[in-house]
Image (cartoon, grey):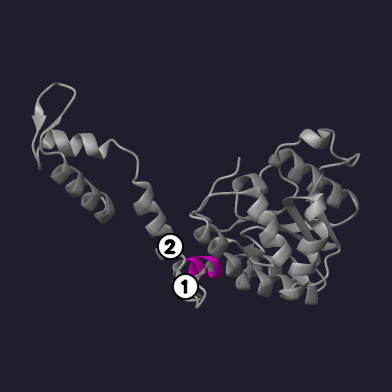
């Protein structure tokens, strides 16, 4: 049992004095019944949020806004993954004709952590739009470094994001302001008109949309060496030599 769970169990046992368990017996603090009952419960949401904040090295600026730290475990883990990806990309240069990398945006090219923490890790599409309009999200520095290195070595750069097509112009402006190179192309999820290469049209799920778009990129003659994302749904469906999964403990998108 981890230290975190051990602490939760002890707190639960202390609070369980006088509580009635399913058998009708009274579970006293520290009893095996109380401990077993608590161990079956899911993780405490408040504790999970604190664990996530610690992982990102959370700190507040003068305005009371949350940010991630460059010395955090999140950055260390991201650097390790990106370093392996860069090494693989280097190995493929000269072997692969017309090499390319594909990058997700949210929590891949940019980090939404501070905004997520400011909103208690809840999602509000209106607030997300405001954050995009205001350029609130922070650059993911290891990914920025990888992307610029790739572009400088003749690798084509593509952005492929679940943000909708109406959010495209401001999103590209933000990425440019953060130092990303001008992409060969950028793809935003269709909201008004779907391209012919997506048979699922406006009803695509994430895997259909992203894998179908990667297939379209490869149909233009590019060979996707790295497909970089923070969700498994960013990476499923093939059409890339190597999928690169970045850490993101904040949310899961199927």
Q: Is residue 229 above or below residue 137?
A: above
Picture residue at 19% right of the left edge, 35% below the top: 36
The image shows residue 147 at horizontal and vertical percentages of 72, 70
Q: Which residue is mark 1?
A: 60
Above or below: residue 19 compared with residue 241: above
Q: Is residue 92 left or right of residue 58?
A: right
Point 52% across, 69% down: residue: 65
The picture quadrant where one finds residue 172 is: bottom right
Residue that carries the numbered disc 2 in the rendered image:
53
Does 75 appear in magenta?
Answer: yes
Q: Is residue 75 left or right of residue 209?
A: left
Residue shown at 17%/48% (left/top)? 10
Query: Bounds of the magenta span?
Result: 74-79
Relative to 230, 72 lies left or right: left
N-term-proximal mark, 1 vs 2: 2
Q: Name the quadrant of the C terminus.
A: top right
Say whether residue 235 is visible: no
The reply to whether the magenta stretch includes residue 56 is no
Which residue occupies 60% across, 54% down?
230
């Amino acid at each position: 049992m981890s230290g975190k769970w051990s602490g939760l169990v002890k707190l639960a046992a202390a609070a369980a004095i006088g509580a009635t368990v399913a058998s009708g017996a009274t579970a006293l603090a520290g009893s095996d019944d109380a401990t077993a009952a608590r161990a079956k419960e899911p993780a405490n949401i408040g504790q999970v949020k604190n664990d996530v904040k610690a992982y990102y090295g959370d700190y507040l600026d003068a305005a009371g806004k949350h940010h991630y730290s460059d010395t955090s475990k999140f950055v260390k883990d991201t650097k390790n993954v990106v370093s392996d990806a860069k090494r693989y990309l280097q190995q493929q240069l000269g072997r692969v004709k017309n090499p390319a990398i594909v990058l997700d945006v949210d929590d891949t090219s940019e980090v939404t952590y501070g905004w997520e923490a400011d909103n208690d890790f809840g999602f509000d599409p209106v607030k997300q739009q405001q954050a995009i309009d205001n350029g609130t999200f922070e650059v993911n520095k290891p990914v920025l470094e990888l992307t610029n290195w790739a572009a400088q070595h003749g690798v084509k750069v593509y952005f492929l994001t679940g943000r909708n097509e109406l959010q495209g112009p401001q999103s590209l402006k933000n990425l440019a302001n953060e130092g990303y190179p001008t992409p060969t192309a950028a793809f935003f999820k269709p909201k008004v008109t779907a391209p012919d290469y997506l048979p699922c049209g406006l009803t695509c799920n994430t895997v259909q949309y992203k894998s179908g778009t990667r297939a379209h990129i490869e149909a233009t003659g590019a060979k996707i060496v790295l497909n970089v994302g923070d969700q498994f749904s960013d990476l499923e469906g093939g059409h890339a030599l190597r999928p690169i999964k970045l850490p993101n403990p904040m949310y899961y998108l199927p």
